[in-house]
Image (spheres, rainbow, N blue to C red):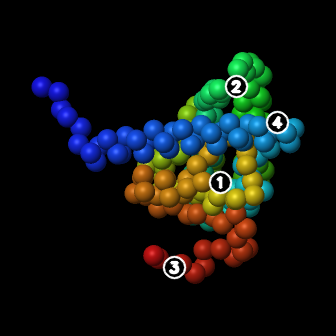
Amino acid sequence: DEEIEGPGEARAELRRQSTRRARRKRIARRRIDEESRGGADGDAGRAAPARLELAATLAERHQAHLIGLHARPPFEPVIADAGAFPMDRLFDDHAAALAASEDGSSMAFAAAVKGKSVASEWRSADGYADALLTVHARYADLTVVGQNDPEFSSGLPLPPDLPEIVALGTGRPVLVVPFVGVPASFGRRVMLC
C-alpha cells in the first residue's frame, strides 16, 4: 500500500536537499568570514535605523500599534570533512552574535519610537526570520521589511529574498524599504503593481 514517488516528487525532494546543503555552506562561510573580521555586527544593517524610523512615523501617522520582531535562529553545526572542529567555540560565537544582534535591534527600535506618540511592542522569538515573520505578518495590517543589502551580513542566517517570502507567504501588504534609504516625504505618491 506504499505510494511510489513520481519523477516530479523525487526531483522536488532533490532540490530541497540541495537548497538545505547550500544554506549550510553559506552559513559556514559567513561564520568563517565573521571570525576573520572579528565578530558579527549587532544591527540589522546600516539601513535599519531609517527603516525603523519609517515604520514608527507611519504608525504614528495612522495611530497604529507598532511591533518590532527579532528572530533568534537556532545554531546550525558546521559539517566538516577535515577532522575535528571546535563546536563549543562556534556555539559561543553564535550565542554572542545573537545577543549582539538582539541588543542592537532593540536599541534601534527604542530609538525609533522615542518621542513619538505611538503604541509599540518589542518581540523576540526563537526561529528563522522568514518563518517567524511570515506567521507574525499574518496578524498585521502592514509589514515593513528591508531590501537585502548585498554588502552587509549580520552573521545570522537571513534569506536574501525575505520580502518576497513574506509577501507570498502571507498574502498581506508588505512595504519593502530599499537598503539605500527612503526620502523624507514617503507615502505621498503610491504605485500599485
Q: Earlier in the sequence, mark 2 or mark 1?
A: 2
Query: Dot 2 lies on which element?
Result: loop
- Whether residues under marks 2 and 4 lie with C-beta atoms below 8 angstroms apart, the answer is no
Mark closest to the chain's N terminus, 2 or 3:
2
Density class for disc 1 (Cα within 10 Å; few <14, some 14-19, many ≥20) is: some
Q: Which residue is mark 1?
A: 118
Location of mark 2 (residue): 82
Give how far apart the Cα atoms at labels 2 and 1 are.
53 Å
Gap in Å between the C-alphas at discs 2 and 4?
A: 18 Å
Image quadrant occupied by the N terminus: top left
Above or below, 157 against 126 in this view is below
Above or below for 2 versus 25: above
Q: Quadrant of residue 71?
A: top right
State the SS at label 1.
Answer: loop
Q: CA distance from mark 1 to mark 3?
A: 27 Å
What residue sits right under mark 4 in the picture?
35
Is the residue under label 3 in contact with that under label 1 (CB below 8 Å)? no
Amino acid type indicated by mark 4: Glu
